[in-house]
Image (spheres, helix red, strand yellow):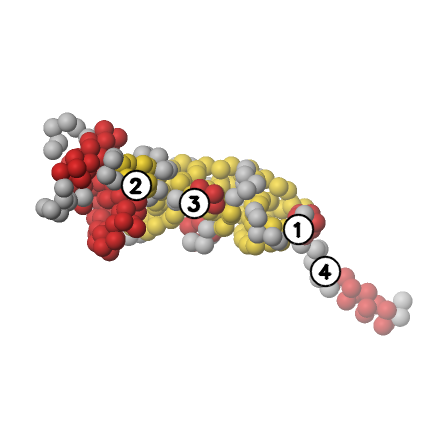
Amino acid sequence: MTPAAALLAAFAIAAPIAPASDPLQVPESAWAAKRFTVKDRVSHLINGLPVTAVVYGAEDGSSDRLEAYVTVDGKAYLGYSHPSQNDRLELDTTPAGRGFRDFLEDGSRIIAYHASIRALNASSLDVIRYKEFHFSRVASFPEGRFIQDGDETLVLSRDLPLGRFLSIGCESFGTISQTAFRTRLYAPLRGRFVETTEKHPRLFTEEIARKEAALARLRDDLQTNAGEYLGLALSIYYDYAARGEARKGWDRQREFFQLPARAPASVRSCFESMRAGLRARLGIPADWP
């Protein structure tokens, strides 16, 4: 071997091997054939293996897909896919949901995303757990999001205990509300979530102040805003109840729906009838006026 040939051979042995193509190109190409493109993608190295979540969006905007993979020996293995094919999907953007943290404090890592059902104007925060090649969905929180209370990261969730379309009314008045939310708080505990609503009264004090300010703005045009006004007022009841002050929350409802002195008897009778209906639906004790 000539000196020049020996030098070239030594260089070839020392040179780094060109990186293999991205293993996720395989599923991405398969989705591209179905006219889906990558909307968002987040990846993290866990115990030496790339773990990735990808959201694919239909080119016509009709729907999204979400899949999570673990890559082993240059091949991407599908471990989780969002169960619905009609939802709008978005990876969570907060450090808690996007950072592959050991949020559950059990040695696993989480990925979080938001799923929206457009027809119902409803969403959820879904939390995926990954540990030792296994994905699982550990929780789905209606209208959920991550929040901070000091140094503690929590999940805030809002449900509709009176139904998605709350209808109240009588002969003189009626409205439908989709915003009578009850707020609950959850914290991680050894691989799961536990409700900790009663441990964070300050957050509900802030919520009450914010909602009362919104009610004041809506009150000027109740003909247009009756449903939203009703929903906010009832949400304030639930916020007081979360602080252990349900009776005060019920008393405030009379203030929120106080009628002017000039209101005719028929309207007063109507509102008393609606209050009685809400009393029953909220489970208000009979000795609370």
Depth check, mark 4 against mark 1: the one in front is 1
Q: Amino acid at mark 1?
A: Arg
Depth check, mark 2 against mark 3: the one in front is 2
Alpha carbon of mark 1 to alpha carbon of mark 2: how far?
Answer: 43 Å
- Residue visible at 55% across and 42% down in the picture: 86
Label 3, residues with CA under 10 Å away: few <14, some 14-19, many ≥20: few
Q: Residue furthest left?
A: 261
Q: Which mark is residue 18?
A: 4
Alpha carbon of mark 2 to alpha carbon of mark 3: how far?
Answer: 18 Å
- Residue visible at 81% across and 68% down in the picture: 8
Q: Which mark is residue 35?
A: 1
Q: Residue furthest right?
A: 1
Alpha carbon of mark 3 to alpha carbon of mark 4: how far?
Answer: 48 Å
Left or right of residue 158: residue 208: left
- Residue visible at 22% across and 55% down in the picture: 220
Left or right of residue 40: residue 96: left
Tell me whether the residue at label 1 lies in contact with that at label 3, contact meaning CB atoms closer than 8 angstroms.
no
Is residue 96 at all visible to an observer of this figure? yes
- Dot 2 corresponds to which residue? 175
**Residue 107 or 273: which is nearer the viewer?**
273
